Amino acid sequence: MSEATMQNQTVTAVIGGTGLTRLEGLVLDEDRVIETPYGAPSSPLHLGHYAGHPVVFLARHGQDHRFAPHQVNYRANIWALHHLGIRRVVAVAAVGGIHPALGPAQLAVPDQIIDYTWGRAHTFSEEGRVLHADCTEPYDGALRAALIRATAAAGVEALSQGVYAVTQGPRLETAAEVRKLRAEGCDMVGMTAMPEAALARELDLAYATLAVSVNWAAGLGPEGSDIHGDIVASLERGMDKVRRVLRVVLGEA
Ligand code: HPA
């Protein structure tokens, strides 16, 4: 894919999270290694075509899942996509379900975020260039709508809104923390939506998340259930649905 393609068409990028380290069906043109003012992105950017449309794929945690959520170089990832001319970013994220409809392998297109992370490099602001990104609506409305339409077209049930709580990780939450998150209005809990969404907003990228629950959040599963067991059992089932939705949304890009 040439730079001209990037500039003249709306190229969609997919940031894959846990369980989605490659994009099946992507006809690869090139792996592009990009250096940024913030260091290296998590992995080379995979430039290619998907159902005839130009698509770029980036594995958020690195190809071999080497970066924990607090170690991901979010600034380098988002800067590199912007530098390539990307204007639309679909972020795939595994989460723990808090909302009753978000059991393992269920999808959601969240519309809000509460950031509980700390100490992450979270802005492109610097002395002399102060950015106050408007995050009232942290996700792009048109891209969310496209994702919601795609879930319907793919015949995949999905919650069409919800509040994504971003915790620091990498440990999972305590049951009391999840009760608090629920009381504060959170519907799902993951570890990566911030600062990713805010950085995308700072650079004016249209950004939306396709969340896949891979477990009940701590303390909400049935008696005797274990979170890691749930994740192993549901990750592939959930990602299979994600791939079906991506096929639609990327195919019509
Ligand atoms: N908590 C936080 N992040 C997660 C979870 C969870 O239960 N499951 C997958 N990512």
Image: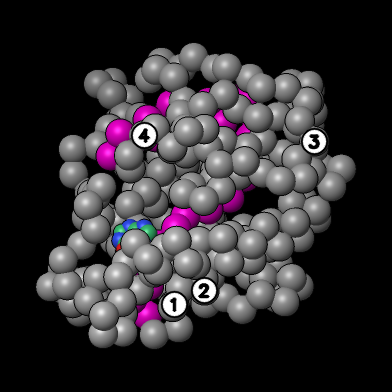
Marks 2 and 1, how far apart at CA = 5 Å
Q: Secondary structure at mark 1?
A: loop
- Asked whether the beta carbons under mark 2 and mark 1 sit within 8 Å of each other, the answer is yes
Position above or below: 236 against 9: below
Q: Is mark 3 within 8 Å of ligand 1?
A: no
Q: Secondary structure at mark 2?
A: loop
Position above or below: 120 against 107: above
Q: Residue at x 44, y 78 (%)?
A: 103
Query: In the image, what residue type sits under mark 1?
Result: Leu
Where is residue 156 drawn, in percent x and y? 66, 75
The residue carrying mark 2 is: 106
**In which quadrant of the rendered view does residue 28 lie?**
top right
Where is residue 95 drawn, in percent x and y? 40, 62
The residue carrying mark 1 is: 102
Query: In the image, what residue type sits under mark 4?
Result: Phe
Q: Earlier in the sequence, mark 4 or mark 2?
A: 4
Would you say residue 219 sits in the magenta stretch?
no
Query: In the image, what residue type sits under mark 2?
Result: Gln
Disc marking residue 27: 3
**Which quarter of the rendering shows the N terminus?**
top right
Q: Earlier in the sequence, mark 2 or mark 3?
A: 3
Q: Secondary structure at mark 3?
A: strand
* Ligand 1, image quadrant it occupies: bottom left
> Does residue 56 appear left or right of residue 139 in this picture?
right
Coloring applied to the structure? one colour
